Amino acid sequence: MEQSIKSGRIAGLDLLRAAAIVLVLMAHYPKTSTGPITRMLNFGWTGVDLFFILSGYLIAGQLFAALSSGREISITAFYLRRLLRTLPNYYVILAAYAVLSLTGAATPAPLWKFVTFLQNMGIPSTFAPSWSLCVEEQFYLIFPLMVFVIARIGSPKVAVSVFAGILVLEIAIRAGIWFFARPDLLPEKEALATYMAELYYPTYCRLDGITLGVGLAALKNFRPVLWQQLMARGNHALAGSCVFLLLSIVALWKHYSFLCSTLGFTLLSIAFVLLTASVLSDGGLLARLRVPGVQYIALLSYSIYLTHSLAIECSSWLAAQAGATLQSPLGIGITLILILVFANLLYHLVERPFLTLRDRIFGTNKVPRRNEALMPVTQSR
């Protein structure tokens, strides 16, 4: 059974969410050197893929739990819960970037793309971390409709075929784009822009993690025997995760290669879905791990994700006023403080009030009820 703590949150998922946001911060923090250490720090971008796994698992878990218990799925209620969970925070920060662009402190951008979550079709000119929110929001929009149709068909084989087909299609799409664009043959600057715009940002290239997260939720809700067998082998899942993580690092290490562009994301997502299974198992090593501050960081992770770029930019200015750089102990300290200040302000002034409103509308009385994945999502009661 999944372990939980007194607050009703699943400790293992909090651990993964905290790890995911720390990885993102490592990747996005400005660096002045090159070499293996910097390269490994930059691998922190994989934290986004871990968020994708958690989102797929928790969002699908809501809908699959309803299906498996014979309850009717309310798509309207689902969309309203998502709207109250994710949009207020996002639009407040988007408004901040819009104001900064008017003052010249941020790069102007096509606002309509950001409002409609289409900025990942290309390279975002500002508020770059928001690209992953596009993948999330598009998933939230389409997935309930897919579940509704699959439920009407009533065939488990169709469901398995659909989601297995998405994984195969993802690899095929990336392979076709790679052969068309050949980023490995371009000069570095052009190669990076091509790779990011054509293979890294677009939703149709980044569904591996969400799809595998959905598969994990399906296993839990529709194959209870297999799920219990998996939960009894949490450390085996952890070992498998380590193997696939090493394979993904090998695949992703050479920038713009065919292996990196096609199988890299899939191998990484397999590693993370096994990792997620391991922390859900009571017998798993990570499931029993308790790290001080993890729940706090997990609770703030969505707000941290949205505000950390602004916090880093402000920290750079403050550090310069003190004659320091962001890489100095003073600069790092200033940045950590501002990241927490910005995230707490957004959480307490925007996120928490809207969560309270959501829970009032849907008759719950605890904020947050369960681990909220995102970037984050809610697990149903």
Image (cartoon, rainbow, N blue to C red):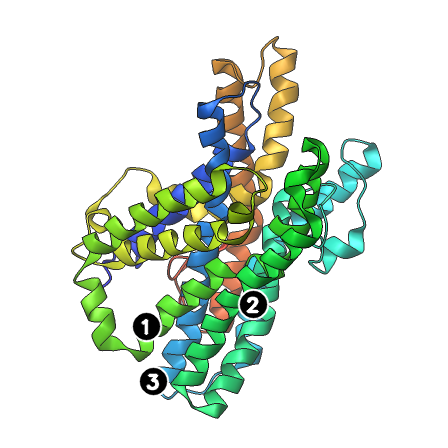
Do we see residue 301 in this rendering? yes
Above or below: residue 76 compared with residue 7: below
Give the foreground label among 3 and 1: 1
> In x, y percent, where is residue 286?
24, 47
Query: Where does residue 284 sit, x and y in percent of width and height?
Result: 19, 53
Of labels 3 and 1, earlier in sequence is 3
Q: Is residue 69 left or right of residue 37?
A: left
Residue at 37% of width from left, 73% of height from top? 218
Read off the residue under disc 1: 219
Element type where label 1 sits in the image: helix
Measure the alpha-carbon separation of dots 2 and 3: 22 Å
Q: Secondary structure at mark 3?
A: loop
Mark 2: amino acid: Tyr
Determine the residue positioned at 71% across, 33% down.
187
Residue 140, disc: 2
Q: Rounded to the nearest whole Å, what is the CA distance between mark 2 and mark 1? A: 20 Å
The mark that comes first in sequence, 2 or 3, is 3
How crowded pointer 1 is (Cα within 10 Å; few <14, some 14-19, many 20+) is rated as some
Q: Are marks 3 and 1 in contact (CB under 8 Å)?
A: no
Q: Residue at x 43, y 57 (%)?
A: 53
Amino acid type shown at disc 1: Leu
**Residue at (56% x, 33% y) in the render:** 28
- Between 10 and 200, which is closer to the camera in this rendering? 200
In this rendering, would 261 be left or right of 106? left
Mark 3 nearby-residue class (10 Å; few <14, some 14–19, many ≥20): few
In the image, farthest residue toward the bottom: 153
Identify residue for label 3: 69
Q: Amino acid at mark 3?
A: Ser
Looking at the image, is mark 2 or mark 1 nearer the viewer? 1
Residue 123 at what x, y percent from top left?
71, 46
**Vertical position of residue 315 compared to residue 250: above or below:** above
Distance from Cα at disc 3 to Cα at disc 1: 14 Å
